[in-house]
Image: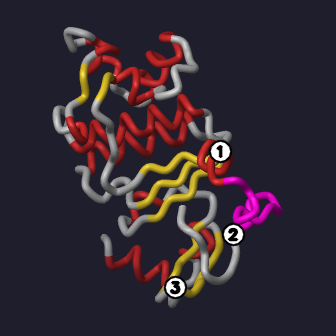
Amino acid sequence: MIDMFEGKICIDGVDISRVPLTLLRSRLSIIPQDPVLFSGTIRFNLDPEDKVSDWELWRSLEIAQLKSVVTELPNQLDEMVTEGGENFSVGQRQLFCLARAFVRKSRILIMDEATASIDMETDAILQDVIKTAFRDRTVLTIAHRIATILNSDRILVLDQGKLMENDSPENLLKKPDGLFTSLVKANK
């Protein structure tokens, strides 16, 4: 979310550089490689503006498969999160960020290497949650793990910042000499 020096990004035909930053940030949810939790309660981490009901918070935790984790905590939604969320595993922090994105109801979810620091089992959970809970939203996934993106509707393959391939995974895999095909073969 820094100023651009060249080019432009348009969402639904709107140049985002012309949208006030606070409005833009309210319409996007980003789950970074290093998940961010804030010092405060779980409730605050999911809903910092205190806009949704407890039922919605519990629903987001259920969707992110964290309901049982939070239910077992002495203060549940009011349990304190330590600095950076260190009292939770990296995978759990990623799932909390996903629950936060669900609470915000953002139409666009950006996952920037969100599964790079988690094990394959948690990655699979995350992918299942995204497939169901965000099926009616746009999800942009930046990933090096091929398994993370195989179920995507469309894949853009970049090489040194240039678009090399752009199609469905099925169509890209039909190209035996394609860049995407070579990446999939290298990851088997």
What residue would you read off at disc 2?
9
The residue closer to the viewer here, 5 or 163, is 5
Magenta stretch encompasses residue 17: yes
The residue closer to the viewer here, 136 or 88, is 88
The residue closer to the viewer here, 163 or 39, is 39
- Depicted 122 relative to depicted 181: above or below: above
- Depicted 10 relative to depicted 137: above or below: below
Instruction: Name the residue: 41% across, 57% down.
Output: 148
Label 1, secondary structure: give it: helix
What residue would you read off at disc 1?
27
Instruction: Name the residue: 25% across, 51% down.
Output: 118
Instruction: Name the residue: 46% across, 37% down.
Output: 129
**Image location (x, y in percent) of residue 135:** 62, 40
For residue 178, side relative to residue 39 (left or right): right
Three-letter residue code for mark 2: Ile
Magenta stretch encompasses residue 136: no
Q: Are marks 2 and 3 in contact (CB under 8 Å)?
A: no
Quarter of the N terminus within the rendering: bottom right
Three-letter residue code for mark 1: Arg
Q: Depth-wise, is mark 1 or mark 3 nearer the camera?
A: 1
**Image location (x, y in percent) of residue 17:** 70, 65
Which picture quadrant has residue 93? Answer: top left
Label 3, secondary structure: give it: loop
For residue 19, side relative to residue 54 (left or right): right
Q: Are marks 1 and 3 in contact (CB under 8 Å)?
A: no
First to last magenta residue range: 10-20
